[in-house]
Every structure is written in structure tokens, then in C-alpha cells.
Image: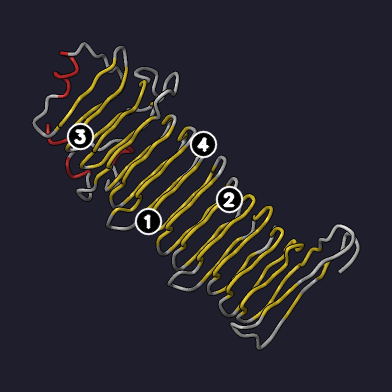
Amino acid sequence: MAGTNLGISAISTSSTTAGSVLNITTKGGAKSIDVSGITTDALKSINGPGVTLTGGLTSSGSIGAISLDSATGGTINGVSIGKFTVKGEFSDNLVLSGTSADLNTFKAGSITGGTWTVGGSANSISAASAATWSPTFGGAMKTVTIAGDANVVISAMSIGTFTVKGALNNSQIRLTGTGNDLNKLAIGGALSGSVINSAGSIGAITAAALINGEIYAGIASLSNGLALPSTVVDFASMSSIKSVRVKAGASGTTFSNSDIAAANLGVLSLGTLQTTGNANVTGIVGETIASLTATTNKKFVLKKLNATSDIAALLSNMGVMLGQIVVQAPGLG
């Protein structure tokens, strides 16, 4: 196709197989074309390096690979996709009905929206940024990498490694597995206005700050709108959080109006706490806490806290004033 401002209303194939290839080649002019829709059976690949998919794509079978310039404004329906590469913007909805590795690899210049419903799992998902992205996976997401900021609502059985090199803002990550649901979450900027809620355990979390956030593992639904567990029965399971660390060198308040809760808490290094002016009760609750390092009016370190530890007395002896921050082990009663 040669020229500018070109468009194809629809491409339809029939009786294609896992060995069939659809090539869309552009040349001359802007070397680009809008395609309003594609309907096909199984395919080995769709190769459209100059194509902006402005409508939907429907496939009755699996597609080995898809390569596009961008996809904006439609829904992609299929069984599974092996490798999906989008050079620029991706804002489509994505519906894959398989139950195994439905989406092996996905890479986009940016994810700018879209609701994904994937019956199975994903091996690798990466983008320069992700905004208003809402994926739901019936299985696991092995690796998710966002090179900039992220605003997401993710639901999955588990996530292996989740890396956000910018900030994680106004997001929700809900994991429903029974094992180690989130192995590693590394955030270069702040974790702000976000909720991480795991039915199972959580590994290591690092961020520059934790502001207006919640990190829960194995917490039951709390009554009366409580933001922190207050009794042992609020723990649905003996899940754990291995570590939450605010990166060294972060300046100013690094923990504010936020909650961390699990039956077993590991190493917590939270930087400078905002101890007054929090909108809600805020703090750390666990049946056991391996260690807690933070700064209020002075730096303090607490280690090996369990149901017999008198936390209030330990802090008082160190001259630490917590104000509206709660550090509690429900086993204390």
C-alpha cells in the first residue's frame, strides 16, 4: 500500500492453519496504514510493522506471533498468542480464552488503557509505561516490567517479578493464590495511593516511599471499615511478608498514612515515619515481626517481636514517640 492517510476497512481470512502467515506490507509515503478489523482462524503470524489496528481482531484459533505499529480502539479476541509486539501505543481490550500459557510474551511502547481478560497465564509483559491498564489473569504472571510510571489494576493467581522503574500510583494488585503470590516487587519511585492484597505470601518489596498505601498478605475482610487487623481472627491464613524496604537515600517522609499487615512480618525498613496528621489509623500489624527499622523523633530498631513482646514498652524505653502510628502484635490481646 503506497500513499498517506490510507485505510483498510477489514481483512478476513478463512481456513487458515497454524502454518499460515498474514503479511501486511507498506511502502512509500508514511509507510503506514490503518486497519479497521481483522477476522481469521489460526495463524502462525500476523506481520504488520506499519499497521495501526483501529478496530478489533478476532481469531478462532491460536496465533503464534503478532507484530503491529499500534493498536488503538478495539478488542482482540482469541485463544492464545505466543508473541505480541507493538512498537507504539496499545490501548485495546484483550480477551484470550485458553487456560494454559495464553500470552507468552507481550511488549509495547506504551500501554494506555484496556481491560484484559486472560484465562491462563503470561510469561513476560513489558512496556515503557502503563496507564489505566486493567488485566485479569486466571493463572500466573511470571514477569511484568514497566520502564516508567504505572497506574494499573491487576488481578492474578500470582506474579513472579514486578518491576516499575518509575512510580506506582493509584493502583491495585490483587493476588488469589495460596503460595508465594508475589515474589518480588521493585519500584524505583514511590508506591502511592495503591493497594497490594495477597491471599498468600509476599516476598520482597522495595520503593522510594510508601504513601497512602496498603500491603496485606492473608488478611480476612475487616469489619466496621477497619484498615488494620485488630485480633488474631482477622488473619485468614498464616501468610508472610518477607521484607518491605524504603530505599536508602530517600529524603523526607517515606512512610505516611499506610498499612502493612500479615501474620508473619519479616524485615521492615521504612525510613522516616509521618507520626501525626495521618487521615486514618496507620501502621504495622503482625503476630510476629522479625525486625522493624524506622525514624520518628529518633531512629529505632526492633527485633524478634512476637506475641509476648511489649512493643509499647520497648519504644518507650528508647524514647520513641509514635503518635498516630500503630505497631502491634494481635497476640498481645
Q: What residue appears at the point 51 percent right and 66 percent down from the top-left corner?
A: 103
The reply, left or right, for residue 258 in relation to residue 308 is right
Question: Does label 3 or label 4 sit earlier along the sequence?
Answer: 4
- Badge 4 element: loop
Task: Say which amino acid is labelled 2.
Answer: Ala
Q: Secondary structure at mark 2?
A: strand
How many labels were placed on the picture? 4
Give the side of residue 136 with respect to residue 148, left or right: left
Q: Which mark is residue 127?
A: 2
Q: Nearer the viewer, mark 3 or mark 2?
A: 2
**What distance separates the C-alpha of mark 3 from that of mark 4?**
27 Å
Question: Front-most of 325 and 31?
Answer: 31
Give coordinates of residue 241: x percent, y percent.
Answer: 28, 42
- Residue that carries the numbered disc 4 in the rendered image: 167
How far is the residue under mark 1 from the one under mark 3? Answer: 24 Å
Q: In which quadrant is the C terminus drawn? A: top left
Q: Secondary structure at mark 3?
A: strand
> Alpha carbon of mark 3 to alpha carbon of mark 2: how far?
36 Å
Q: Is residue 122 left or right of residue 294?
A: right
Residue bearing mark 3: 289
- Identify whether 240 is placed above or below 331: below
